[in-house]
Amino acid sequence: MTQVSKDHGIAVALLTEFTTHRLPRALDIQAKVERKEPLDDLDIGFLRDVFETAQTIKPQVDRQPEYQEIYACAVELYTEIMDKAMENERERLGPASPL
């Protein structure tokens, strides 16, 4: 198996996982933070896992330009979720919060 075909197979598997599991869960969490609900430990763990995976697959994405846009959009979505969650937490704790 060539590196190109191996990379393609991995990319297809990652995209399938993203579209069937991670994106729906991320959108649920996004709706949760938009309702100003706090994230629970499962939500935070999920987002942490997503960022770790994003760092791990970045070299592969760099080798395959056709996946860079979706990668960037996914990272942006997760960043927006975390930013909104932090904003909500600051509001919940008040102005004296160190967050």
Image: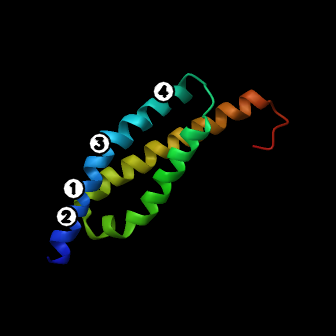
Q: Nearer the viewer, mark 4 or mark 3?
A: 3
First of labels 1, 3 by sequence position: 1
The residue that mark 3 highlights is: 19
Decide: few, some or many residues near mark 2? Use Cα within 10 Å; few <14, some 14-19, many ≥20.
Answer: some
Give residue 11's position: percent from left, percent from top: 25, 59
Judged left or right of residue 99, residue 83 is left
Of residues 97 and 57, the one nearer the viewer is 57
Residue marked by disc 1 = 12
Residue 95 percent location from the top left of the image: 82, 33
What kind of element bears circle 1?
helix
State yes or no: discs 1 and 4 in contact (Cβ < 8 Å): no
- Which residue is found at the position 49% from the left and 54% from the top? 51
**Disc marking residue 31:** 4
C-alpha separation, residue under disc 1 versus residue under disc 2: 6 Å
The answer to whether the residues at label 1 and label 2 have Cβ atoms under 8 Å apart is: yes
Residue at 37 percent across and 47 percent down: it is 73
| Amino acid type, residue under disc 2 in the picture | His
Sequence-earlier tag: 4 or 3:
3
Q: Is residue 35 left or right of residue 3?
A: right
Q: Position of residue 21 (x, y in %)?
A: 35, 41
Residue 68's place in the image compared with 83, above or below, is below
How far is disc 1 from disc 4 in space, using C-alphas?
27 Å
Which residue position holds label 2?
8
